Amino acid sequence: MFGDGAMLRMIAYGNELNLAHPPRPVDAKTAWQPEWTAKLRIKSVHTALLGMASAPNAQDLLREGLLGGEE
């Protein structure tokens, strides 16, 4: 079924941001009870079928007149 094709998968991990409210006090001896915390992790994923043309992007579509560009 898939003997003639190959797939490429790329995953990129970026920075991480940790948030808390209220912010941690400067003095480490001060009691601190955060109301909430959140962790934001950045990740990007791309999958491509090798040997096939890439899908058109928005600029290609506009250039060809498919999304309101000139015909």
Image (spheres, grey):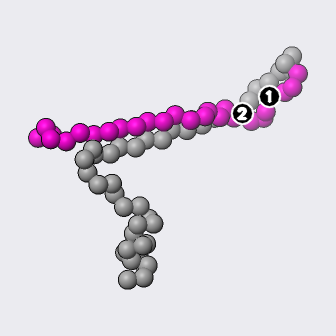
- Confirm whether the magenta stretch covers residue 50: no
Q: Is residue 33 visible?
A: yes
User: What mark, if any, has residue 7 been given in the picture?
Assistant: none
Q: In this view, which residue lies farthest toward the left? A: 1
Q: Is 57 positioned to the left or the right of 22 in the image?
A: left
Quadrant for residue 1, please give it: top left
Residue at 32 percent of width and 45 percent of height: 48
Look at the picture and state if 56 lies above or below 62: above
Front residue of this view, candidates 30 and 7? 7
**Helix, strand or loop status at disc 2:** strand
Q: In this view, which residue lies farthest toward the top? A: 29
Q: How many marks?
A: 2
The location of residue 9, given as percent across then percent down, is 35, 38
**Label 2–label 1 contact, CB within 8 A:** yes
- Give the residues in magenta: 1-27
The location of residue 63, given as percent across then percent down, is 42, 73
Mark 1 residue crowding within 10 angstroms, few (<14) / some (14–19) / many (20+): some
Residue for badge 1: 24
Look at the picture and state if 59 lies above or below 5: below
**The C terminus: image quadrant:** bottom left
Amino acid type assigned to the residue bearing label 1 in the image: Arg
Residue for badge 2: 20
For the residues labelled 2 and 1, the Cα–Cα distance comes to 8 Å
